[in-house]
Image (cartoon, coloured by chain):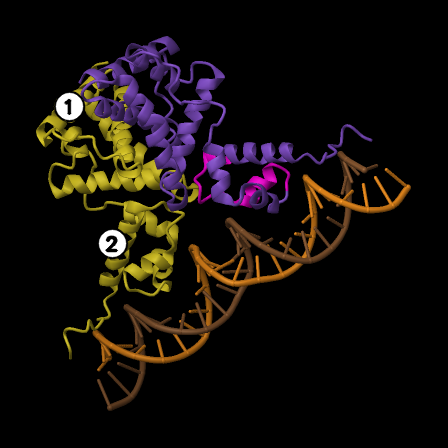
Chain colours: A yellow, B purple, C brown, D orange
Amino acid sequence: MDPTTSIKKRDAVATRAAILAAARQRFLSESYDSVGLRDIAGDARVDVALISRYFGGKEGLFRDVLSHDDKPDLFREPRTIAEVPGFLAQLVVEDGSDDRQLRMEMFIIMLRSASSPKAGQVIRDLVHLDVLGPLTELIGGDQAELRANMLLAILMGIGVLSTIMMVDNFGGTSTDRDECIERFRCLFEAALTC
Amino acid sequence: MDPTTSIKKRDAVATRAAILAAARQRFLSESYDSVGLRDIAGDARVDVALISRYFGGKEGLFRDVLSHDDKPDLFREPRTIAEVPGFLAQLVVEDGSDDRQLRMEMFIIMLRSASSPKAGQVIRDLVHLDVLGPLTELIGGDQAELRANMLLAILMGIGVLSTIMMVDNFGGTSTDRDECIERFRCLFEAALTC
DNA sequence: AAAATAAGTCAACAGCTGTTGATTTACTTC
DNA sequence: GAAGTAAATCAACAGCTGTTGACTTATTTT
């Protein structure tokens, strides 16, 4: 046995995970329609047929990429309204735990494929159920839904502009990270009080 | 000659315009990759081959849909910084002239196809050149670029959420149009002063 | 060790993609 | 009215799409 040449052990869960990881990476930088199953299979060093076999098809794969059975809620971390602006600000400047970065990547995947007829409905349901729902409940009060919408709009707008439109100089050139966070925190707060 | 049955006159500019209009409508509600040339040709009641013939291909057609030779600048209307927040607020609630609505539709088309490898570069160039450029110049001052980015982020975020994510209750249920505009104006102003 | 089950491979499928060339039709000019 | 030109049509192309079935391996169970 030569350990240098990777001998592929027959492990169903491992290959399933490899496919999922490769798909996630692809969907993170391209839209649903522009990504081919053969691209994903190639990245995962796996036969194309296995994708349809394991996930029931492209749509099922995409659904599984976006599903998060382990993490119960997308917005379980900020407990009070006061924490929300700061939390969102840290989210957009990618300052925080790996768990938070994973959350922002989730948003990017959604934003990238939201205009695809096949993937669109999946994403829209997820946004309403797992994002706007908890966020609205957290904010509470009279116009909670409107506030939640505005916060999410800013969050997604920054995501679109920085990641998809490649406008990365949100922090400016001389401004440091803390100053940038504070600026965004202020903006999110304005969305709550406007 | 029967005027009820549409007799197709052989008019090159007319068919070109029909293709352009059909393409615009398709790209307004779907992504670049998910729209087929045969869909567009069908809407325009035109043979598919004419599209590649007149526009040089799908990419050329998309470029022409987004091009605006008649309107010189996307941001020529607001003349001073003070006018910007109110102008953007009216833009997002679709209150204004047809010219303004056309501008917002432009943004939606860009947002929808920004993640397609083929269309992406065209869109990114357009955003930098025709939107961020004039807007930054208009704002002026020290951190004009940062301000412009934040404004555009909010603008696009609202566009994504309301049009693509189908979250339409930005105005709420009981709030009227004027109140809604004022709210957005306040938010845009906050982005400038934060 | 033999049988049974699971995992992976291969080839091929219909269907759709954008694009091109040759051909036919309608309109314009002389 | 005939010749010439522009516009539209038709058919077909390679290439890619996701998906399926039959087949070959490796691993586990009996």
Q: Is residue A21 above or below residue B100?
A: below
Residue B172 appearing in the image: no
Residue B164, percent across and down? Answer: 39, 32
Q: Is residue A97 above or below residue C14?
A: above
The image quarter containing residue D29 is bottom left
Quadrant (top left/top right/bottom left/bottom right) for the N terminus of chain B: top right
Magenta span: B26-46
Q: Is residue A5 left or right of residue A61?
A: left
Label drawn at residue A21: 2
Chain where mark 2 sits: A
Q: Secondary structure at mark 2?
A: helix
Q: Is residue B161 above or below residue B86?
A: below
Q: Is residue B165 left or right of residue B63?
A: left
Instruction: Check disc 1 and give the amino acid type.
Output: Arg
Q: Nearer the viewer, residue A59 or B73?
A: B73
Q: Separation of disc 1 and disc 2 at Cα?
A: 34 Å
> Is A162 contained in the magenta span?
no
Q: Nearer the viewer, residue D27 or B47?
A: B47
Q: Nearer the viewer, residue C27 or C25?
A: C27
